[in-house]
Image (cartoon, rainbow, N blue to C red):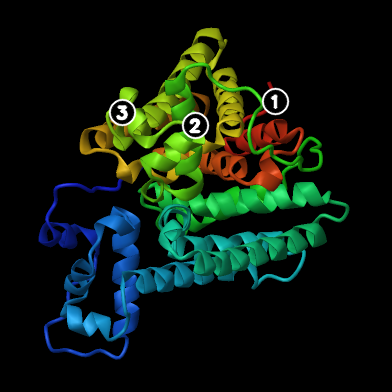
Amino acid sequence: MREDTVRTGTETAAARVAPKTGAVPLPRGTRPRNRRELIVTAARELFSRHGYAHVAMSDIAAAVGIGPSALYRHFRGKQELLHAVVAEALDSCLAGLYTAKPGELDVLAGEFAETALARRELGVLWQREARHLPAEQYARLARRLHAARRALDDRLTAARPGLDPGHAELLSWGTLGVAASLAYQHVELPAPEGPELVAHLMHRVATADLPGIGEPRPRTSRSPLSHRSRREALLAAATELFAERGYASVSLEETGAAVGIAGQSIYHHFASKHEILATAVHRCVERLWLDLAEVLAAAEDHAQALRRLVWRYTRNALASRHLVTLIATETEHLQEADRRRTHQFQRDYIAEWLALLGAVHPAMAPAEARVRVQAVLSVVNDVARTPRLGTRPGIARALHRLGCELLELGPE
């Protein structure tokens, strides 16, 4: 779960440009040497804030203060520009992983916190917008990310001799998850407190003592059991397709074929593809609220409630990774009213976590509490969506421990 501030819909291009970037457009006719860099910077801010699908090349040109023809001299199209934006953010953010010597976890956490904050948009750019890239380009960027993760594995193992390879991989993804979480929280993190807090959370993950986890299990492509209800079968198939390929890339015909019916027959159960997506998102939302209500009703104090909430959220994410993916990547495709309700839910849900954390740690600053909560949710979501980790026996207990570490919760 995240606090999503993406605004889309009925805004005109001219109205959208002004609030999207902090840069002042250059006077027409000027030709700075770093124009390409300015274009990438403007596009990075626009894509991360409003979504690739809702930003036109003319928006980016206006933000930089140039005409569209000048923009096309640097980039042949919006997809090429998206690749440049994601590649630059990825390389800039991950640069902090390579500067420390093996074993210097304090230095590594500090350096990575600095570069992650400098490119805090990376989480949303990679998880949501990179899906618009051609498969080959996406794969090349994914290999760079995995190479950085393996380098982090090596540094953790050097600092912690005897660390199990499975634990090293989990702690590496957890550290990267803290960095990714920065894209989904819009709080001020001024120096030096901001970088110090992020470095502290990264170090806490990297040095966590976790319960054992087993070897990855292959995910079966399809359960031998299925819904008797045709509507529920359609919803389950669509959720999986939307999560794996992206909402815009899946047709009703493909969704119907997944359950053995013609695409037009879907209209007996759903009015539109938008309604299918909205129903899936609503299903995820209601499950989280029910869990929260059960936790609050049974817990004896705030700390116990928070520990149990981390556990319930972790179990749900691992069991429903496709729904987690929809919330993380596809809500921009909701109709305006559904999108606004979903974003309000995200804010309200995180507020419940913040209230519990504030009661446990009353001296903790609100900004710090928000950073910690979002880090927990992002780490859990990222691991749940990573097959090599999400299928490991014991992963739920290990993730629960990581979440409690990030929230400074002791054992129950």
**Residue tagged by mark 1?**
411
Q: Return the mark for residue 267.
A: 3
Three-letter code, disc 1: Pro
Of residues 400 and 79, the one drawn nearer to the viewer in this rendering: 79
Mark 1–mark 2 distance (CA, rounded to whole Å): 49 Å
Q: Residue at x 35, y 41 (%)?
A: 331
In the image, 84: left or right of 336?
A: right
Spatial distance from mark 2 to mark 3, Cα to Cα? 14 Å
Q: Residues within 10 Å of mark 3 (few under 14, many from 20)?
A: few
Is label 3 in a helix, a strand or a loop? helix
Distance between the alpha carbons at the discs numbered 3 and 1: 50 Å
Compared across the picture, whether 343 is left or right of 193 comes to left
Question: Can the viewer see residue 410?
Answer: yes
Question: Residue 12: horizontal and vertical position, in percent?
Answer: 12, 56
- First of labels 1, 2 by sequence position: 2
Left or right: residue 109 versus residue 83 is right
- Label 1 neighbour load within 10 Å: few <14, some 14-19, many 20+: few
Amino acid type of the residue tagged 2 in the rendering: Gly
- Ranked by sequence position, the earlier of labels 3 and 1 is 3
Q: Are marks 3 and 1 in contact (CB under 8 Å)?
A: no
Which of the marked residues, 2 or 3, is nearer the chain's N terminus? Answer: 2
Kindly identify which residue carries mark 2: 260
Q: x, y percentage for residue 372? A: 51, 41
Lateral position of residue 158 relative to residue 280, left or right? right
Circle 1 — which element? loop
